[in-house]
Amino acid sequence: MTDSPTFVCRFGDGQITRMTIHTRLDKLDVGRGVRLARHAYRSRVRRAPPPIVEAHFEREGARLASYDAEALKKSA
């Protein structure tokens, strides 16, 4: 379907979002992933999202990059 990686994001309340992010594989756009994950959370839960605990990019079952809460704060 697509060669773009999937951004998997876990929020402080345990909710998880997964979405394909159009980004270059050699320069993953974590800021875009965070913004889209927050929008998806708002759409699903109908309230402001809590802090993101962790996230990662994956493609075809392989993890490309992982981010902790501190790294995600800096990228958003």
Image (tube, grey):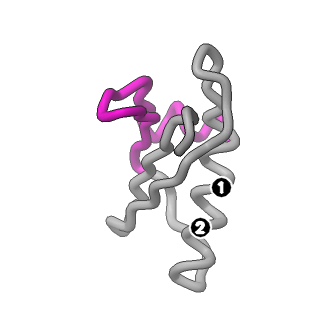
Indicate which disc residue 23 carries. none
Badge 2 density bin: few <14, some 14–19, many ≥20, Cα 10 Å: some
Question: Residue 17: x percent and y percent?
Answer: 45, 60
Cα separation between marks 1 and 2: 6 Å
Judge by depth and name the residue closer to the eye, 38 or 62. Answer: 62
Q: Nearer the viewer, residue 12 or 57?
A: 57
Secondary structure under tag 1 reads helix
Q: Position of residue 73 (x, y in %)?
A: 59, 40
Quarter of the picture holding the C terminus: top right
Location of residue 66 with respect to 20 vertically, above or below: above
Outermost top residue = 26
User: What range is drawn magenta here?
Assistant: 53-76
Kindly identify which residue carries mark 2: 40
Q: Which mark is residue 36?
A: 1
Q: Is residue 40 above or below residue 4?
A: below
Would you say the residues marked 1 and 2 are in contact, meaning their CB atoms lie under 8 Å apart?
yes
The image shows residue 6 at horizontal and vertical percentages of: 48, 42
Q: Residue at x 59, y 67 (%)?
A: 40
